Amino acid sequence: MGTARHNLRVDGARLWSTLMETAAFGATPAGGINRLTLSPADGQVRNWFRDACEAAGLTVGTDELGTQFALRPGRDSTRPPVATGSHLDTQPTGGRFDGILGTLAGLEVVRTLNDAGLETEAPILIVNWTNEEGSRYAPATMASAAHVGTFTTADILARTDAEGVSVADALRTLDIVATEPTGSRAIGAFVELHIEQGPILEAEDKTIGVVEGGQGILWFDGTITGFESHAGTTPMPRRRDALLGLAEIALAVERIAHAHGPSAVGTLGEAVIGAPSRNVIPGRVRFTLDIRDPRAATLDAIDAELRTALAEIAGRRNLGFTLDLVWRQEPVPFDPGIVALIERGAESLGLPHRRMVSGASHDACNLALKVPTAMIFVPCKDGISHNEAESATQSDCTAGADLLLQTLVTLANAPVAAARG
Ligand code: GLV
Ligand code: MN
Ligand code: MN
């Protein structure tokens, strides 16, 4: 085997065909994917991924939360692997690229190195993190967070979905058996390729986003309690309508996010009436909030303003409320050395690029707390993501994978001190 060269390019058609082949697992009629974490469709794609990695000569391990690690040995097995990857789970109305591109691009990088008969000094590791999306189990990116020690494994295993099924039960149902403890897998550096999920690259005609960090996130679970009573007989002034309280809260979220604009964003994504009935005034509603901003101080300010607004609305309408912070992700900077390496790589490949901060959450944001980390973005059509219409071009996916290949090989062949940051 020779040592990896820099004129190497991935096979873009092969990468594309793996994206389209795996899109069959959980495919929706509208052309997207519904592959909630640890669902039967997720089980199918995990098996596909394990088999494809093993066929490429990789050794696949699984941690206690079901995260898959596929290792390609390096010349120096004492060096920690240079890792890449993302996630294969999707939103319920997800697309074919969010997470999937980064995971399958890792496989394509390895296949390209294999075809060329090239080895690297440090090993290369491809990771499929469990539950990046956070739609079945909160929080998002829970497995990578547990990997870096933000949560204990026991805490995450006990989390339940809306039907009361725990993560531990879901892993058992899919016959996922751990071969290593969570957090035990050595990782020397982490580079994740992902679609941008926003409109900036496309609008500026750039192929590559060089990601300097991720913004901060607050997730809240809340409830409003009023009083269920007859829709025909209860006069308007006597009502304690929980849904009307929630309607005001939704507008307060919009107002507060605008007040901290343009960077802050706020979303009331789930609103569930306790016992919905056409002729009963809603007495209980449950809701979720997702608030984001690149500055920690703004998150603090929004948190305080939200609590004041809820108290005022509930007091005026004679409603009860709860508001629990279930996740706080601090804004996280990526490793300046890897960010600069990606930027130089885009330059050398002749790819138009710009620096940016990620609006979405990613497993890389957790990894960055522990190891040198950065991300590469490619454009998606109309900036649309978390939607079945999500779309990216074969040529942009190929460009991103070429840059990923170059970045991983440079890191894996760098002198030990530089590689270990
Ligand atoms: C993950 O997809 C997120 O950014 O919420
Ligand atoms: Mn993603
Ligand atoms: Mn997503």
Image (spheres, rainbow, N blue to C red):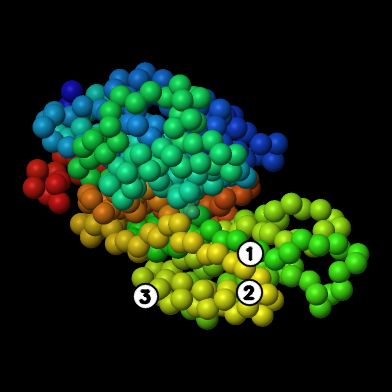
Q: Secondary structure at mark 3?
A: helix
Q: Residue at x 81, y 53 (%)?
A: 277
Q: Secondary structure at mark 2?
A: helix
Whole-percent x and y of residue 81?
21, 36
Tell which residue pokes out farthest to the right in this image. Answer: 232
Q: Secondary structure at mark 1?
A: strand
Q: Residue at x 23, y 50 (%)?
A: 370
Q: 15 or 78: which is nearer to us?
A: 78
Q: Tell us which disc is closer to us: 3 or 1.
A: 1
Q: Is residue 309 visible?
A: yes
Above or below, 83 against 239 in this view is above
Above or below, 370 against 316 in this view is above
Q: Which mark is residue 297?
A: 3
Above or below, 81 against 179 in this view is below
Q: Residue at x 58, y 55 (%)?
A: 384
Evaluate if marks 1 and 2 touch, with contact meaning CB atoms under 8 Å apart: yes
Label 3 to label 1: alpha-carbon separation: 27 Å
Q: 127 or 346: which is nearer to us?
A: 127
Residue under numbered circle 2: 314
Residue under numbered circle 1: 224
Q: Which quadrant of the rendered structure holds the N terminus? A: top left
Which amino acid does the dot numbered 2 rest on?
Ala
Q: Residue at x 45, y 57 (%)?
A: 326
**Label 1, ligand 1: CB separation under 8 Å:** no
Which amino acid does the dot numbered 3 rest on?
Ala
